[in-house]
Image (cartoon, helix red, strand yellow):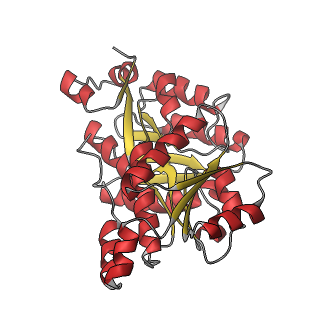
Amino acid sequence: MTEIRVAHHELKPLMMAAMATLEPARRQEILDGKGAIAVIYPDIGEPYRSIFSKIIEGIQEQVKTPISTYPVGPNSNVVDLNAQLNRGGVKVVIALGRQGLKVASGLAPEIAVVVGGVLSVPENESRNLTGISLTPDPALLFSLLKKLLPSIKRVTVIYDPQHSDWLIKLAREAAKVQGLELIAREAHDLASAAHLYDAVFASADSRQDAIWLPQDSTTVDDETILPLVLKESWSKGLPVFSSSFLHVKKGVMFALYPNNLGLGRDLASSALGALSGDLRKRGVSPLREVLTAVNLRTASHIGLNLDYQQQRSFDFVFPEP
């Protein structure tokens, strides 16, 4: 895994630089976690509860002192929550999930918000927030693609600009770095997405082309689009990779998915940066704390035979040994 992971805490140098300008007593107070940081997260059942618990564990591990956590639901009283946060001296809130983000929008303006555990944030909202998406960074996806299949020259992605425009902007730059041509096609509903996939498969060259399935509910759904893509990719031996772990079990060659503990640590680093007054990094970043999954049967079908050492570099191998 070390070959595709990025070192933890990109924000840490910025955070420490900002803290160096503070009074020693204030700097120590921040390092002691007294500033204080709180987490709000959806009051929800499994399997999502375990995911949020692991993210919170990573936050706690990085902050190194006890933090307050507040489960929230659709009927949560934001006025009461504001009062609780005020009594606790909370300066920064890490808001997890859609529900956490929704509640955080009603918090007092002096409380900084770091968002995590969501796939995307509307651009008009993200300008005033700091956070990390659950969407894997295209740079990591393309890097692994080229490592596994160096002959690939083009990557096609079909996306809804309303959901994924921010991601495609990042993907264009990431593709250039890897020497890839990114062919991005817009679709605004499943019917138009299906037509575009048909056209892609009709003209694709399995030696040079690959298809990327983003986490975009308009253009990639499990009922119609995924079976179509899997059937055609198998028939033509065309590599397909994804931003969703579940797709690997269904036949996609490989995917990246969240390392929830690592995500928690990075969210905590962002929160500590906000606590120190470092507000230079605005907006929601893609996920760089990732795990990898591979489908050996699919890889073998397209001519990619991974040896035992290569298989061990993945966090999840399907079919399981």
Q: Quadrant of the C terminus?
A: top left
Q: Is residue 18 visible?
A: no
Residue 295 in the image: state x and y as whole percent. 39, 24
Name the residue furthest right: 75
| Apparent side of residue 89 relative to residue 206 in the rendered image (left or right) | right
Residue drawn where x is 50% and y is 56% of the image: 67
Q: Residue 308 is drawn in which quadrant?
A: top left
Q: Quadrant of the N terminus?
A: top left
Name the residue furthest top: 321
| Apparent side of residue 298 relative to residue 189 in the rendered image (left or right) | left
Closer to the camera, 18 or 249? 18
Residue drawn where x is 58% and y is 60% of the image: 165
Residue 120 in the image: state x and y as whole percent. 59, 55
Residue drawn where x is 59% and y is 67% of the image: 126
Q: Please tell me whether residue 192 is drawn above or below residue 225 in the rendered image.
A: below
Residue 145 in the image: state x and y as whole percent. 34, 41
Closer to the camera, 112 or 28? 28
Q: Is residue 254 visible?
A: yes
| Apparent side of residue 248 relative to residue 229 in the rendered image (left or right) | left
